[in-house]
Image (cartoon, rainbow, N blue to C red):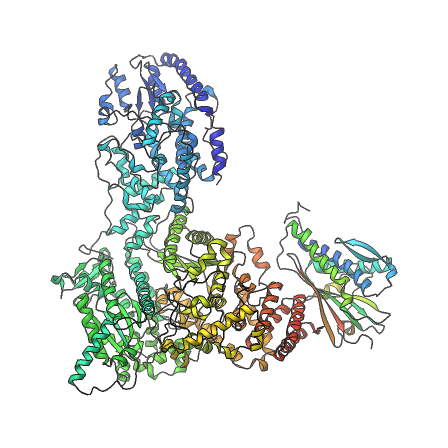
């Protein structure tokens, strides 16, 4: 925005030249004109008089009769009409409605209604103006302050668009019919040829409005202006943020141009604007700069006196002069403010004291809307309504009327998102999970920090045990150490918390829901619950029939519930009006009556009339949950937080140590929880997670159940298949069609069959689960895969701008969360729910989203970010690329994936390296105080307590984007640092990232191998300081090795995890699965979204379950596809490369190309992944902080888009042409494609490693092969020559062999392609 | 040039013009560098801002021109896969093959810069590479001749047979011995990638030239 130009323009050409010359002349001229016209008019009219002699009026704003008419009347009746307000000459101000700023400004004036004139004329004499005063109290007040402002102060963007429009309206008026002789209305000093585009719009409108304005429409117009201001404020993409920025400048601006300007914010009519900082008083006030030329002298005085005492910046400090009017804050105005500033709560509450003439205007602005059920939605709606009042005048009106007509719900903005999140129970619950995961993590940290925690619970257990054993001499010592998992689950958590202080409700059917009424609500217009119900019903039926649906996993926690719920909510005509507030939880008593969780309250009420509704009490939930976790933590720290009321405990070690039985432990835990929280918990115990969870079902309510291993078979064969995790509705029905309903039935089905039906992976899981086998470890520390914010309640946009600003705000929410978790992400996914064509416009659920299509788009950023602005920018681009009808949007979500910057997670267990790594990690010191020694980076010593993102900070802030990762990779200390305290989100678990992610991770892991693995000669060849560093690392490592228990307490690799690694899980190949592409069809007909799927085992079931159905299906089928494709890949990998490489080379590349064509941005499994870990051993030097290939990969010109549309949106000028032109990217080696980078990479490889690894060689071969296919023989030639030099120079003969091997393979390919072999000189 | 717009420009034609111009220069230079003709018939000229050698033998020049004139329509339609300058010994066995492998992007986008400066730079690089290629190639036996082959894509050959672009300048299917060499080695010279064309030049060289 060309603010500067604008300002210049405004200040220089504004025609105000020195405040007076021009205006004085102009006003004189106008007066003359008036005098000239008057006789003519009188003549024409006949009945003239002079009742108004000595009266000079100034019309402000809209009046009835119009300003024009008033002017005529004044002519007829001997008065004066001032087009410009003059403090000294104007005697009366005519207005019907004035904004408060005007009010305060015109306090000393006689502000009268136009009726005074008409009545006076009727009466034939000048009536007393007193009873026509606009404000009754006015006469009692006489404030000296009349202020004016210089116009050139307002040239600011955004908010000041308002100033401009208002002032321009003044100006236009001046040039209007008043003076036909004066030629075309002067386009006003304010008219900005060079004005910021943002301002153009309001101005343009204003000029449409203003032709009228000779008649006074000030007040009315003013209102419009205010609204418009909002619109224009919201326009800027930055939304709130931006706004603040502007304000900053604004203030500064005002500072700088203080000289002859007063800060008035005088109120003159009914509206008191409770400024809350977002809009400053000045923003709201009209600037009658134009009116004032005559009044200058004294005004200057008053200004100078007034301005100091009035802070220009803080409206609230303005002495509010007219107390009785103060309360007349219309909610609209208020919310206008809301929408502008996130802190909504600052205003004066809107009481109603409609005392004056404004009633008419304000009555439609203060809509008596039915109160929505909960507060949250209320805020939402109000804001929303504002939100929609865009820059256009028409819109405003429409919206306002809309609003008063019906409770239109509107998509929101500003504070609304945080508000939404402060009320959304789903949000709460979902954040809690991560919070508690964090909590568990922090426990671990603390323990590590203090070198062992006090387990009060454990101590008590020990005592108990001691007592017992004293009595009973020989308690059978814990036999074989069998693993024991406890699943602790609170019994109907929300209910029990809700009624823990209300004993009267105990034992009664109680439901927690947002609805507090009788369970009936009036049906809203536009809603069609029947239709929606039919839709769901239909969908469900479809599901049942659709048997061929390939093994979709419905990770719904309690599938039957949902099933039932669909049933249960099956409403017929008369039920349609029942409340659709869902029941979050209901007591066991209610459940007996048939009420289910998730049922709509209205329906439940029918089933169980005495059902009591209890409101949500999030604070209490949190407290109780925290207490529960604390209680659990007093026993052990091997806790996996499943949700706010559910956790898994790995009690194996604990039981062995304390020597109690699982049952005793469970009782102790339950008693503790009961005592501390007043709520009951159930505990299920089993030898693995699956069994523990299933046992909990048996244990409920208020019980505990130990599933002994000998009972497992009997127990599980009775269980319904649907009670297995991962078996949802659709899979259940599919199984049922196979004649399988219980796990026992399922045991009869062969693995082959299952795999055929459900895909290898799922089939195997089923096969194992139904036998009670489950090798998932209890993961006390988890990695976050994505950070997202989503809102699909109350989204109703009218304009694109609305959606944009919503996205901006949502991005800020995401930013908040990212920063909260200390993460940065590289992929931004925009998820949008669109009303399904044909679905009712108003969904059955109030503010709900109804039947929707889910669309998603994602873009990968060049670097990880947590900046809301950046995210917003991308999201908006994506949004535009999707070309959606904004009014049909029902839900918007933003997700940031490919997180890094969090606690560094080690590479996924891979191939052979896995074991070495494990070793290293296991030896890793448990304490953190020595990290600095190994931190190889000279610059950042990676403070051991650094938050996950902190290590990126020091450099990131200064050197900007691309260096972030670089420095991180360099500053990332060798394995030792893994142990750092921070585990905030995760660490020990197999990082479930996509290949991409893995790649980036691997960059960061530079390790020092154990001394035995390092070639001494290489070491000696290293520069001395490097060598020292390596040696120091070793020596320290040795020290650490002496510390007992280091490995076993290692949180990074908790024992169960390791065992999981070792035990052959599904024969599924551990190596990186390659990039699997997922095509999501979408309506806009573009290439769709291509996502790299992580390994299936790494899919979080919850996340999966939370996905929309369509997405789940997509994923499932994609996994199935991959699974069928995988076997070949593994075979290839498992064979000795020396034997098999020759032929497969070509074949493999072909495959890769196929993939690549689909997604230019993906390069398949990154060679780096392979190459890099191998490159590492001799500890790449600290002197070379950034191996170039990384840099290359990390800052690929900003952005990699993954789908057509978004790319076109990013580079609007170079649309498809480009993408078609480069259907596949240049071949890369470890992400490097530039010759120099590849050279560096190769050099590093050859010089730092004594013995090349097969995979690395294969990577190079593959790369060379690609070069051949890419017809880039020149490069190939150079590279081969380079390698030749490098490798043949190498002392190790292995390298020569490696080179020969590479060349042989390449020659084969060249021979095949060109019929001759390369000449290698 | 600057006023070219997408509408009034046949990109294929432009590309063909550029390439044929280049090929002409390249062929002359190859003939000079590989000493197929005595250096006396060559003159130093400036092309792409670098010195090149061009023959002043009118018949030779005519032959090259005619050849390229016929090649041009193929390039225009993106039907020429390779243009090969084959240097043959007395027995008409190929000893060296300079292969210009041409591939055009399926969709062209041209801005004036890419046309002018960038492509020129790339072509200059190729020319320079040709002028020094004798360093990596063995000497040719005396008495060599040359011929120009075109590898067409798909059915373009048939059209060429049907329609003679230039009267009395027919194309025939190349002899096996011109196309294939025994024990040939491949020496990549240069690869250029531009918006309008991707071309790589390599030399296939017979292992034993003097047999």
Q: Is residue A1181 toward the left or the right of residue A1047 in the image?
A: right
Work out whether residue A13 or residue A590 is closer to the camera in this orientation and state it.
A13
Residue that lies at the very extreme toward the left in this rendered image: A504
Question: Is residue A918 positioned above or below A9 on the image?
Answer: below
- x and y, in percent, of residue A1307 in the image: 66, 75
Work out whether residue A590 or residue A435 is closer to the camera in this orientation and state it.
A435
Quadrant in the picture for residue B91:
bottom right
Asked if one can make out residue A587 in the rendered structure from this viewpoint, the answer is no
Quadrant in the picture for residue B153:
bottom right
- x and y, in percent, of residue B172 in the image: 78, 67
Quadrant in the picture for residue A109:
top left
Work out whether residue B185 or residue A619 is closer to the camera in this orientation and state it.
A619
Question: Is residue B83 positioned above or below A158 on the image?
Answer: below
Question: Is residue A1015 positioned above or below A1079 on the image?
Answer: below
Q: Is residue A123 toward the left or the right of residue B9 in the image?
A: left
- x and y, in percent, of residue A518 in the image: 17, 55
- x and y, in percent, of residue A514 in the image: 23, 56
Work out whether residue A692 or residue A845 is closer to the camera in this orientation and state it.
A692
**Total numbered circles:** 0
The C terminus of chain A - image quarter: bottom right
Asked if one can make out residue B72 in the rendered structure from this viewpoint, the answer is yes
Q: Is residue B205 toward the left or the right of residue A154 in the image?
A: right
């Amino acid at each position: 925005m060309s603010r500067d130009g604008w300002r210049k323009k405004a200040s220089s050409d504004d025609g105000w030249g020195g405040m007076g010359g021009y205006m004085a002349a102009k006003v004189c001229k106008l007066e003359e004109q008036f005098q000239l016209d008057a006789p003519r008019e009188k003549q024409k009219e006949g009945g003239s008089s002079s009742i108004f002699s000595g009266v000079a009026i100034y019309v402000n704003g809209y009046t009835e009769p119009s300003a024009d008419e008033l002017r005529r009347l004044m002519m007829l009746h001997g008065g004066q009409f001032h087009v410009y307000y003059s403090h000294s000459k104007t005697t009366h101000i005519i207005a019907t409605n004035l904004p408060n700023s005007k009010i305060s400004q015109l306090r000393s004036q006689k502000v009268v209604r136009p009726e005074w004139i008409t009545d006076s004329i009727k009466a034939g004499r000048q009536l007393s103006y007193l009873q026509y005063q606009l404000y009754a109290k006015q006469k009692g007040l006489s404030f000296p302050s009349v202020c004016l402002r210089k116009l050139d102060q307002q040239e600011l963007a955004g908010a000041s668009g308002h100033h401009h429009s208002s002032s321009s309206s003044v100006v236009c008026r001046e040039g209007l019919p008043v003076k036909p002789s004066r030629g075309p209305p002067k386009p006003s000093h304010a008219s900005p040829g060079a004005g910021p585009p943002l301002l153009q719009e309001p101005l343009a409108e204003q000029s449409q409005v203003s032709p009228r304005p000779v008649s006074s429409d000030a007040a009315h117009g003013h209102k419009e202006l205010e609204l418009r201001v909002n619109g224009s404020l919201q326009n800027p993409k930055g939304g709130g943020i931006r706004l603040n920025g502007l304000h900053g400048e604004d203030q500064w601006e005002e500072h700088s141009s203080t000289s002859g300007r007063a800060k008035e914010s005088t109120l003159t009519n009914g509206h008191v604007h409770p400024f809350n900082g977002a809009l400053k008083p000045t923003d709201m006030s009209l600037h009658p700069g134009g009116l004032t030329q005559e009044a200058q002298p004294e005004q200057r005085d008053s200004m100078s006196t007034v301005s100091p005492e009035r802070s220009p910046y803080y409206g609230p400090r303005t002495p509010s002069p007219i107390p009785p009017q103060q309360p007349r804050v219309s909610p609209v105005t208020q919310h206008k403010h809301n929408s502008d500033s996130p802190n909504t709560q600052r205003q004066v509450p809107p009481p109603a004291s409609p005392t004056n003439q404004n009633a008419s205007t304000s009555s439609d602005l203060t809509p008596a809307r039915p109160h929505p059920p909960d507060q949250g939605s209320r805020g939402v709606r109000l804001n929303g309504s504002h939100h929609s009042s865009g820059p256009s005048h028409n819109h405003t009106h429409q919206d306002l009327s809309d609003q008063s007509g019906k409770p239109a719900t509107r998509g929101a903005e500003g504070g609304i998102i945080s508000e939404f999140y402060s009320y959304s129970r789903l949000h709460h619950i979902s954040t809690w999970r991560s919070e508690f995961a964090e909590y568990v993590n922090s426990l671990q940290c603390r323990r590590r920090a203090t070198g062992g925690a006090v387990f009060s619970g454990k101590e008590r257990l020990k005592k108990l045990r001691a007592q017992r054993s004293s009595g009973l001499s020989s308690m059978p010592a814990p036999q074989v150490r069998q693993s024991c998992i406890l699943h602790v689950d609170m019994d109907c958590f929300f209910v029990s918390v809700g009624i823990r202080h209300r004993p009267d409700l105990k034992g009664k059917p109680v439901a927690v829901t947002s609805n507090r009424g009788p369970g009936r609500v009036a049906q809203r217009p536009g809603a069609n619950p029947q239709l929606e119900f039919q839709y769901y019903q239909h969908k469900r039926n479809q599901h049942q029939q659709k048997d061929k649906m390939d093994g979709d996993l419905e990770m719904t926690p309690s599938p039957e519930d949902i099933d039932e719920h669909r049933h249960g909510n099956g409403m017929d005509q008369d039920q349609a009006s029942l409340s659709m507030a869902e029941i979050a939880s209901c007591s066991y008593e209610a459940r007996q009556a048939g009420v289910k969780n998730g049922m709509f309250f209205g329906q439940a009420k029918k089933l169980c009339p005495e059902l009591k509704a209890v409101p949500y009490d999030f604070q209490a939930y949190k407290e109780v949950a925290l207490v529960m976790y604390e209680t659990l933590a007093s026993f052990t720290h091997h806790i996996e937080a499943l949700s706010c009321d559910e956790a898994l405990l790995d009690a194996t070690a604990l039981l062995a140590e304390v020597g109690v039985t699982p049952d005793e432990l469970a009782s102790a835990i339950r008693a503790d929880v009961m005592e501390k929280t007043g709520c009951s918990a159930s505990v299920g115990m089993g030898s693995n997670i699956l069994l523990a969870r299933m046992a909990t079902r048996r244990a409920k309510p208020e019980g505990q159940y130990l599933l002994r291993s000998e009972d497992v078979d009997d127990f599980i064969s009775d269980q319904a298949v649907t009670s297995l995790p991962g078996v949802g509705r659709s899979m259940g029905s599919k199984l049922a069609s196979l004649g399988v309903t219980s796990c026992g039935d399922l045991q009869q089905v062969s693995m082959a069959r299952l795999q055929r039906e459900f895909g290898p992976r799922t089939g195997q899981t089923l096969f194992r689960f139904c036998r009670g086998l489950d090798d998932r470890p209890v993961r006390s520390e988890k990695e976050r895969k994505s950070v997202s914010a989503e809102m699909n309640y109350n989204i109703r946009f009218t304009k694109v701008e609305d959606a944009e600003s919503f996205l901006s705000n949502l991005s800020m929410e995401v930013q908040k969360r990212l920063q909260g978790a200390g993460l940065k992400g590289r992929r931004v996914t925009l998820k949008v729910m669109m009303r399904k064509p044909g679905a009712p416009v108003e969904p059955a659920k109030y503010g709900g989203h109804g039947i929707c299509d889910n669309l998603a788009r994602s873009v990968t950023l060049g670097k990880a970010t947590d900046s809301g602005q950046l995210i917003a920018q991308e999201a908006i681009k994506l949004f535009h690329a999707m070309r959606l009808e904004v009014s049909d949007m029902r839900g918007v979500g933003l997700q940031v994936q490919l997180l890094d910057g969090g606690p560094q997670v080690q590479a996924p267990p891979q191939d052979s390296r896995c074991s070495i790594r494990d070793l290293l990690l296991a030896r890793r010191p448990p304490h953190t105080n020595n990290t600095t020694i190994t931190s190889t980076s000279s610059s950042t010593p990676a403070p051991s307590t650094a938050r996950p993102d902190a290590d990126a900070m020091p450099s990131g802030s200064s050197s900007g984007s691309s260096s972030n990762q670089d420095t991180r990779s360099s500053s990332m200390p060798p394995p030792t640092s893994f142990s750092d305290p921070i585990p905030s989100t995760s660490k020990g678990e197999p990082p479930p990232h996509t290949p991409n992610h893995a790649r980036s991770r691997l960059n960061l892991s530079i390790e020092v191998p154990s001394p035995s693995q390092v070639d001494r000669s290489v070491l000696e060849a290293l520069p001395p300081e490097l060598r020292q560093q390596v040696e120091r690392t070793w020596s320290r490592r040795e020290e650490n090795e002496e510390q007992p228990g280091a490995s076993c307490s290692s949180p990074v690799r908790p024992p169960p995890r390791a065992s999981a690694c070792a035990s052959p899980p599904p024969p599924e190949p551990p190596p990186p699965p390659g990039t699997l592409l997922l095509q999501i069809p979408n309506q806009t007909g573009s290439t769709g979204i291509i996502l790299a799927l992580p390994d299936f085992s790494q899919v979080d079931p919850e996340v999966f379950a939370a996905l929309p159905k369509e997405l789940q299906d997509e994923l499932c089928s994609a996994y199935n596809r991959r699974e069928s494709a995988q076997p070949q890949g593994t075979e290839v990998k498992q064979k000795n490369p020396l034997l098999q490489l020759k032929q497969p080379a070509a074949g493999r590349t072909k495959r890769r190309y196929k993939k690549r064509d689909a997604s230019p941005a993906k390069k398949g499994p990154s060679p780096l992944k392979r190459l890099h870990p191998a490159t590492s051993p001799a500890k790449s030097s600290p002197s070379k902080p950034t191996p170039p290939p990384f840099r290359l990969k990390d800052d690929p010109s900003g952005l990699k888009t993954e789908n057509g549309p978004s790319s076109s949106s990013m580079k609007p000028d170079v649309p498809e042409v480009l993408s078609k032109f480069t259907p596949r990217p240049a071949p890369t080696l470890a992400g490097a494609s530039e010759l120099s980078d590849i050279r560096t990479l190769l050099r590093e490889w050859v010089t730092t490693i004594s013995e090349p690894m097969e995979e690395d060689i294969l990577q190079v071969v593959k790369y060379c092969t690609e070069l051949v296919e890419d017809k880039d023989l020149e490069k190939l030639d150079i590279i081969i020559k380079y390698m030749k030099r490098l490798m043949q120079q190498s002392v190790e003969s292995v390298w020569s062999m490696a080179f020969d091997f590479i060349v042989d393979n390449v020659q084969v390919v060249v021979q095949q392609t060109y019929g001759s072999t390369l000449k290698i000189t | 040039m600057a006023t070219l717009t997408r509408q009034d420009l046949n990109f294929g034609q432009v590309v063909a013009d550029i390439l044929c111009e280049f090929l002409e220069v390249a062929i002359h230079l190859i003939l000079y560098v590989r000493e197929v003709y005595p250096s006396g018939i060559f003159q130093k000229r400036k092309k792409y801002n670098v010195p090149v050698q061009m023959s002043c033998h009118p018949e030779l020049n005519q032959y090259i021109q005619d050849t390229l004139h016929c090649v041009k329509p193929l390039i225009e339609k993106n039907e020429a896969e390779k243009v090969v300058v084959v240097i043959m010994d007395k027995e008409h066995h190929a000893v060296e093959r300079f292969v210009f492998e041409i591939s055009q992007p399926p969709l062209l986008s041209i801005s004036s810069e890419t046309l002018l400066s960038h492509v020129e730079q790339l072509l200059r690089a190729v020319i320079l590479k040709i002028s020094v290629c004798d360093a990596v190639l063995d000497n040719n036996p005396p008495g060599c001749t040359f011929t120009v082959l075109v590898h067409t894509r798909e059915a373009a050959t048939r059209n060429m047979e049907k329609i003679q672009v230039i009267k009395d300048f027919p194309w025939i299917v190349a002899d096996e011995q011109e196309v294939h060499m025994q024990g040939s080695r491949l020496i990549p010279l240069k690869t250029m990638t531009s918006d309008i064309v991707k071309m790589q030049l390599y030399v296939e060289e017979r292992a034993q030239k003097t047999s």
